[in-house]
Image (tube, grey):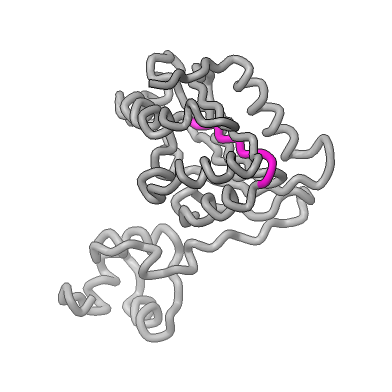
Amino acid sequence: MAAGGWTYAALANKVEVDPKSVERWVNLGRTPRRATAMLAAEILGEDVHALWPALRQARPARAVSPELVALYDQRADLPVSTFVDMLTQAREHIDVLVYAAVFLHEAYPRLNDLLRERAADGCAIRIAIGDPDSPNVQQRGAEERFGHGIESRCRLALMHYRPLAGVSGIEVRTHATTLYNSIYRADDQALVNAHVWGVNAYGAPVWHLRRSGSGGMFDTYADSFAAVWATATPVQER
């Protein structure tokens, strides 16, 4: 605020709150409501999570399911380290079902090295990414108002993962299915990113699951992955 010449009153007027509220953000460390915080961060030209780290935290899960560890309002609330740490801990299985999810490689360039290391230690790894020529992928681009960008990101994801196609213990395939959720599984844990019509995946909710027995939510998504995997086409080495 000081760098931009913003007073409490001026910023309060822009985000439509009382100047006392802005004063409490600054002097008492109060966290505004998410929508207000997003608007204020945009006006100030800052990252919302840098201003208010508390907005990055998961909400404690209510005891609706014993397998639900945490619920996040949107994928953007999760630091990439959450995904990386979960994959690093895997000893038996890593399954990834996405259309592209290039944010992982962009934020963590060592992802392929990590997957190679896990495979070398005996972890079975399956990566399923979207076929950019699939009508379902193209339809998703239209629904998320992403245009042909989703197809480009699928091709970029293929470029990232193709070097793993010939690695022992790692399989990479492309799928042409309608994707209702992106799934990131590591042994008995999974991060499930819902897909919401008209919303990019980074703005949609994520639930963190931990398997506690057979037939629960975790197995529902594990079975879904297996069904898509059975239809997918292996990616060849180059």
Front residue (pair 191, 159): 159
Magenta residue check for 191: no
x%, y% of residue 52?
A: 41, 69
**Residue at the location (74% across, 39% down)?**
217
Q: From the viewer's perspective, is residue 54 above or below residue 64? A: below
Quadrant where the image shows the N terminus: bottom left
**Which segment did they paint magenta?**
91-98
Would you say 101 lies left or right of 169 here?
Answer: left
Left/right placement of residue 185 relative to residue 146 reads right
Residue occupying the point 69% across, 32% down: 222
* Residue 142 visible in rendering: yes
Q: Is residue 67 left or right of residue 126?
A: right
Is residue 43 left or right of 132 when viewed as pictured?
left
Relative to residue 9, is residue 57 depicted above or below? Answer: above
Q: Nearer the viewer, residue 149 or 8?
A: 149
Q: Where 86 falls versus 235 (above or below)?
A: below
The residue that appears at 42% across and 48% down in the rendered structure is 110
Secondary structure mostly seen in magenta is strand
Q: Quadrant of residue 45?
A: bottom left
Closer to the camera in the image, 166 or 17:
166
The answer, for residue 137, to whether it is visible in the render is no
Give x and y (percent) for residue 132. 39, 20
Q: Residue 164, image x and y in percent?
A: 47, 32
Q: Residue at x 60, y 32 (%)?
A: 169
Residue 59 place in picture, x, y as percent: 60, 60
Tell me the quarter of the picture where residue 161 sits: top left
Give the mark count. Answer: 0
Image quarter of residue 105: top left
Which residue of the protein is positioned furthest toward the bottom in this rendering?
27
* Quarter of the image that includes the C terminus: top left
